Image: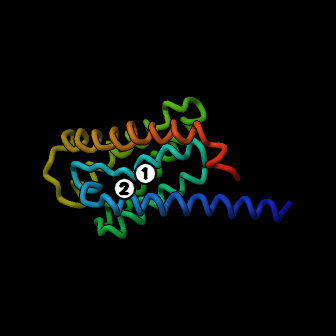
Amino acid sequence: MNKQRNQSTTGRITQGAAIAAVYVALTMIVAPIAFGPVQFRISEALCVLPYFLPSAVPGVTVGCFLANLLCGAAPLDVVFGSIATLIGAVGSYYLGKKNKWLVCLPPILSNTIIVPWVLRYAYGSTDLIPYAMLTVGIGEILAIGVLGNLLLLALERNHRAVFTQ
């Protein structure tokens, strides 16, 4: 039994690490449009993965942290951007238990609310917070609401083949 538990723990850690690596890679590929007041971070589509795997919560959080760190984001962005992703991922995990169509809402909302403040205090953005919320929110809706839902539907059709443990 202990051997099975260790393999299961190892499997969850591996899943989380793989998700983090994909998040970092996707962010770095589109780095010029993944940062700033108007951003489209396609890696945020991975925030739907907690619907399928609890290990995706630390996976996307660590992925966001590493992507911000490796791409030269300000320290406040590294910390609070990762916290926004963590809040969104935890919310996705819990809301996904109730309704799969609610999975995208927490990451969209958490990033739309938190990231504009990060832009203001970490980068000295002079944009009004409501305007920054609008621009960040549009990017989040496109990345998570559109791409994330497409990913959710694709994985739901094939989840047994993709997420075997």
State the image coordinates of residue 2 (x, y, percent, origin top left).
83, 63
Real-space Cα separation, disc 1 to disc 2, in angstroms: 6 Å
Disc ID at residue 85? 1
Side (left or right) of 147 relative to 15 = left
What amino acid type should be assigned to the residue bearing mark 2? Answer: Gly
State the image coordinates of residue 103 (x, y, percent, origin top left).
49, 37
Q: Secondary structure at mark 1?
A: helix
Q: Residues within 10 Å of mark 1 (few under 14, many from 20)?
A: many
Q: Residue at x 38, y 64 (%)?
A: 67
Disc ID at residue 28? none
State the image coordinates of residue 161 (x, y, percent, origin top left).
65, 46
Q: Residue at x 36, y 59 (%)?
A: 27
Q: Return the residue found at the far right.
A: 1
92, above or below 85, in the image:
above
Residue 113 lies in what quarter of the image? top left
Q: Residues within 10 Å of mark 2 (few under 14, many from 20)?
A: many
Q: Residue at x 15, y 47 (%)?
A: 127
State the image coordinates of residue 107 (x, y, percent, origin top left).
42, 43
- Residue in front for this viewpoint, 52 or 127: 52
What amino acid type should be assigned to the residue bearing mark 1? Answer: Thr
135, above or below 62, in the image:
above
Q: Secondary structure at mark 2?
A: helix
Mark 2 and mark 1 in contact (Cβ < 8 Å)? yes
- Residue in front for this viewpoint, 141 or 83: 141
Quarter in which the N terminus is drawn: bottom right
* Residue picked out by circle 2: 81
